[in-house]
Amino acid sequence: MPGLYFEEFSVGQIIEHPIRRTITETDNVLLTTMTHNPAALHLDAEYMSGTEFGRPIINSCLTLSFMVGISVNDTTHGTAVANLGWDDVRFPQPLFCGDTIHIQTEVLELRDSKSRPDNGIVIFSHRAFNQHDELVAECKRSALMLRRPA
């Protein structure tokens, strides 16, 4: 099981995830249309050619999904009981088709679960960077985690 148990995390720990992912137009169109989002800024190259961006930007929900998804193998795969929530989600720079992202996770907080003594809660900060090392997304994620088996 590649994920870490609650006790294996420490506050301030930073995990540089080895998986990098180039975001394709297909990725963007598929998620955008599957979620019934008609926004031209994600789908209409002609329209976007006349904007400040000059081309479609990646759907922010796709960016969030990749950011959190890439982090799972090194953090919570098989050891998370549940995601409890996402907070402070931000997208400070646009992401474009053809950009390659890499992800960094920092452990912000560890605490015991009051309702489930066999579990702990970890607060992660996930950050996504493009190939120019510009921050393109960040969020805090709370996860209910398994404790190491006795």
Image (cartoon, rainbow, N blue to C red):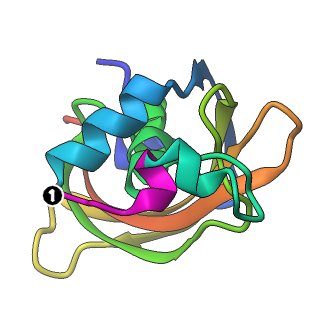
Q: Left or right? Give the position of 89 relative to 61.
A: right
Q: Is residue 120 visible?
A: yes
- Look at the image and tell me whether residue 76 can be seen: no
Nearest to the observer: residue 77 or residue 102: 102
Give the residue pinned by disc 1. Answer: 118
Q: Residue 19's image quarter?
A: top right
Q: Residue at x 39, y 29 (%)?
A: 27
Query: The disc labelled 1 sits on which kind of residue?
Result: Asp
* Image quadrant assignment for residue 76: top left
- The answer to if 90 sits in the magenta stretch is no
In the rendered image, residue 148, in percent from the top left (x then y), is placed at 28, 38
Q: Name above or below for residue 51 compared with residue 4.
A: below
Counting from the top left corner in percent of width and height, residue 1 is at 29, 18
State how many labels appear: 1
Question: Foreground residue, 84 or 36?
Answer: 36
Q: Is residue 4 above or below residue 73?
A: below
Rendered position, 123 above or below 67: below
Q: Nearer the viewer, residue 118 or 23?
A: 23
Which residue is at the far left?
A: 115
**x, y percentage for residue 88?**
52, 79
- Relative image position of residue 13 (x, y in whole percent): 68, 49
Residue at (46, 51) in percent of width and height: 42
Q: Dot 1: few (<14), some (14–19), or many (≥20) neighbours within 10 Å?
A: few
- Which quadrant would the C terminus be assigned to in this image? top left
Dot 1 falls on a residue whose secondary structure is loop
Residue drawn at x 38%, y 46% as measured from the top left: 65
Q: Which residues are magenta?
A: 36-43
Whether residue 49 sits left or right of residue 5 in the image: it is: right
Judge whether residue 39 is colored magenta.
yes
